[in-house]
Image: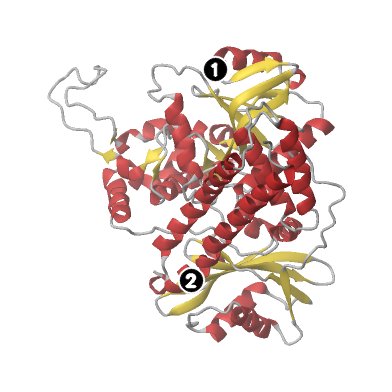
Amino acid sequence: MTPDPNRLAHIADDGFRSLLRRHRAVTTRAQTRFEARDWVGFRKDALERIDAYGVVLDHTIAALHTAGFTTEDRVGWSKARNAFRVRFLDDPAGPIAETFFNSLARKMFTTEGIDPLLEFLEVPLDRHVKLKTVTRSYDTSNGSHLWLLDAARDCRFQASWADLSTDASAVADRLGDTPDSVEIVEAIFFRGKAAYLVGSMSTASQTVPFALAIRHGRTGLRFSAVLVGESDVSILFSYTRAAFHVDSATPVDLVRFLSGLLPHRAAAELWAAIGFRKQAKTERYRDIVRYLERSTEQFTYAPGVPGLVMIVFTLTGYDVVFKVVRDRFPPQKSVTPKQVAERYQLVARHDRAGRLVEAQRFEQLRLPEDRFDSVVLSELLTEASRTVSVSDGQVTFGTVYVERRVTPLDLYVRSADPNEAIRAIVDYGAAIKNLAASNIFPGDMLLKNFGVTRLGRVVFYDYDELTELTECKFRRFPESDDPYDDLAEVPSYGIGPNDIFPEELPRFLGLTKEMRSAFDARHADLFEPEFWIDVQNRIKSGETIEILPYRRTRTLGVHAADLR
């Protein structure tokens, strides 16, 4: 007997509510972890939250099958979809619920693209959810010192402040003139070893976003950094960083508020930043569709050296790239398509440390055939035919990775002002060190595999040879008595599969004399095995090496030893 569509909607509803409970249970633990300085526990929670979506999805699908639903009943599912939407028309979690329903449909039914009979497409026009305030206002009439004290006390930490009055004075000095009004998000943003208060300051002429970093050191809680302005705060919400743990009862309203503060951050990036990865994909897909509807440009090759593993294409006016794995790789690439997928999955679950670009994995994505440059489409159909096909005027991608577009570093240093080129090259070295500290070895460190963001930060985006640093063996070149070793494909002293010779790094750089000099002044230790081995030992000992998500000039005068 075919189950009642309302029964199916009820089961899907139960699954979604279970997901929210799991998500919130993990998220709310962040404050306890912070108060206990339990950084290892926080990392475990981050992975648990990532995994929760798939676990609940599987449980819900099993419940649907137990209730008697079969995928042959497409009409019954469509009716269940309509009943499910009615349940959430007045619910602030409605958009997230509909994404969950879509995930159920896509996992149960074999479809290409989006099936409007089975899934939700756009937000309904008849959704009437009253906007809720996610911020708390502060009285600034008595100066910044007092409202900062109030904001700190409103955090209600179960831990003592080391010297709150002194810290509040230091923060007030950094913020400058007392604003006319202040709004701070009620929920605290937790990530890594820090908590953040995020809000806005307003005067008669402008509204400016700000964020205050709070650290829990050996002597207690301290304000540790002050970020003011969109460029500073935007770095916190970058697509190169792990998600915050922020307990908001109405995440839709939180994203709306953050969008007002950070207009250059796409909604997809903000959803990802607060821990709703699937909703981020929904927003990205809808944004792609809207851009295609309002533009006429074609998909062309992305700027940069063509990849040996990926075919990368883009739309000139759109700030993302699409990456498709080739069917076959040249001999110099020892990886397989399966291994490439595993490395992208590793990045998705890793602390990206502000240096790894988030890659959203889409399956069965369909894009209009007439929007493709003929040369690009031809290469896709010949070099990636296992995952790319064309039918009914649509190009279907079995798997495609979507990333924010950045300027390839090799192109950037050729065209940039010499001083900017040097700055970027120095930051390239810092990026390599940041990756190492997060237990990532890039593998292929050619400049073409790194990029420069809108804010001038160097990031890594080519993951086919990426591996965990602790899996590598860093060595010096052995002394050889064989005069033919320099010519041999395999030297007589032997090279293991995980052997890395840091002395080789300089030959990958291809820098001008001035750029090389600047790089060596800051990062010559990268050419020595000792640097890498030391970082490996720190990681293996259980140390969490922190990478600040803001410029050091934004830090306050808090003694480093106090924050360990």
Is residue 305 left or right of 487 when viewed as pictured? right
Give coordinates of residue 224: x percent, y percent.
52, 71
Q: Residue at x 67, y 66 (%)?
A: 210
Looking at the image, do the residues carrying marks 2 and 1 touch, with CB atoms under 8 Å apart?
no
Is residue 534 left or right of 345 when viewed as pictured? left
Tell me if I can see residue 190 in this picture.
yes
Q: CA distance from mark 2 to mark 1?
A: 48 Å
Q: Residue at x 49, y 22 (%)?
A: 308
Q: Residue at x 65, y 64 (%)?
A: 248
Give coordinates of residue 335: x percent, y percent.
40, 25
Q: Nearer the viewer, residue 179 or 181?
A: 181
The secondary structure type at the circle numbered 2 is helix
Q: Which residue is mark 1?
A: 386
Q: Relative to 328, does residue 66 appear above or below in the rendering? A: below
Q: Amino acid at mark 1?
A: Arg
The mark nearer the N terminus, 2 or 1, is: 2
Q: Which mark is residue 323?
A: none
Q: Which mark is residue 32?
A: 2
Q: Quadrant of the N terminus?
A: top right
Q: Amino acid at mark 2?
A: Thr
Give coordinates of residue 505: x percent, y percent.
36, 35
Q: Relative to 166, does residue 530 appear above or below in the rendering? A: above
